[in-house]
Amino acid sequence: MQSPLIQELIEAFRVLPGVGPKSAQRMAYHLLERNKSGGLLLSQALSKAVEEVGHCSLCRTLTEEETCSICQSARRATGELCIVESPADVGVIEQSGIFQGQYFVLMGHLSPIDGIGPKQIGLDLLESRLSDGSVSELIIATNPTVEGEATAHYIQQMAIKQGVVVSRLAQGIPMGGELEYLDSGTLSQAFLARRSM
């Protein structure tokens, strides 16, 4: 018979994506048996983050400030706005160092089946930002899924109505990739997105 507190801890770990019952049990026992100080540190950091982290008032990414550091930076190109699905996407793009504009984080994608429409992902906020004339180019970086493509199309139509130039991140063969290992969808996209040399 397992302790109710241990069972509660195991169930708490299961809220994380990809963590099943066995993984949750291993994590719980590891912290309790071998790393109680790490467990305390984890609980304090988690509690503080949950209480203090919210959304940036401009781009909607996660931050403990009213406006995130990217939106506050005077070095960023305010006319270029990159649309991403999640704060993790912002992190990946920022690590590359290639983009020097600003972001708008959807916190998801359109999914009518799940009851997620334009308002749920902040497209009303994006539309008002586009209508103020400060954005000259919209770079759509949604995921290449059915939902991501539908979201990209919807945003593209919004931007065109506002007279904003729209571009989409290229998709297809990754750098260093070999044709024989590509799936047909990736190869099809590479052919459709080909450019002159």
Image: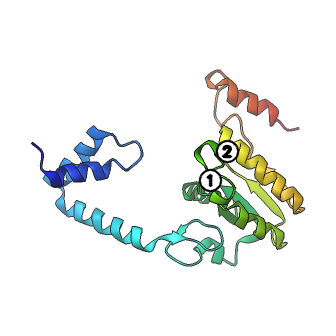
Q: Assign the N terminus to one quadrant of the image.
A: top left
Q: Is residue 89 left or right of residue 36?
A: right
Q: Residues within 10 Å of mark 1 (few under 14, many from 20)?
A: many
Where 77 falls versus 160 (above or below)?
below
Label 2, label 1: how many angstroms apart (C-alpha)? Answer: 8 Å
Left or right: where 51 falls relative to 12: right
Image quarter for residue 144? top right
Q: Position of residue 172 (x, y in %)?
A: 71, 35
Where residue 171 appears, as percent x and y from the top left, is 72, 40
Q: Is residue 190 visible?
A: yes
x 66%, y 62%: residue = 122
**Relative to 33, does residue 97 appear above or below in the rendering?**
below
Task: Identify which residue is drawn at 77% across, 69% down.
Answer: 128
Q: Position of residue 7 (x, y in %)?
A: 20, 49
100 vs 123, nearest the viewer = 123
| Disc 2 + disc 1, Cβ < 8 Å | yes
Q: Is any atom of residue 79 visible in this view?
A: no
Element assignment for label 1: loop
Q: Which mark is residue 10?
A: none
Q: Quadrant of residue 123?
A: bottom right
Q: Image point 28% across, 40% down: which residue?
A: 21
What's the amino acid at mark 2? Gly
Residue 148 circle label: 2
Q: Which residue is mark 1?
A: 85
> What kind of residue is marked 1?
Glu
As rendered, which of 115 and 123 lies closer to the eye?
A: 115
Binning the other alpha carbons within 10 Å of mark 2 as few (below 14), some (14 to 19) or many (20 upward) gives many
Count of numbered marks: 2
The residue that appears at 29% across and 69% down in the rendered structure is: 44
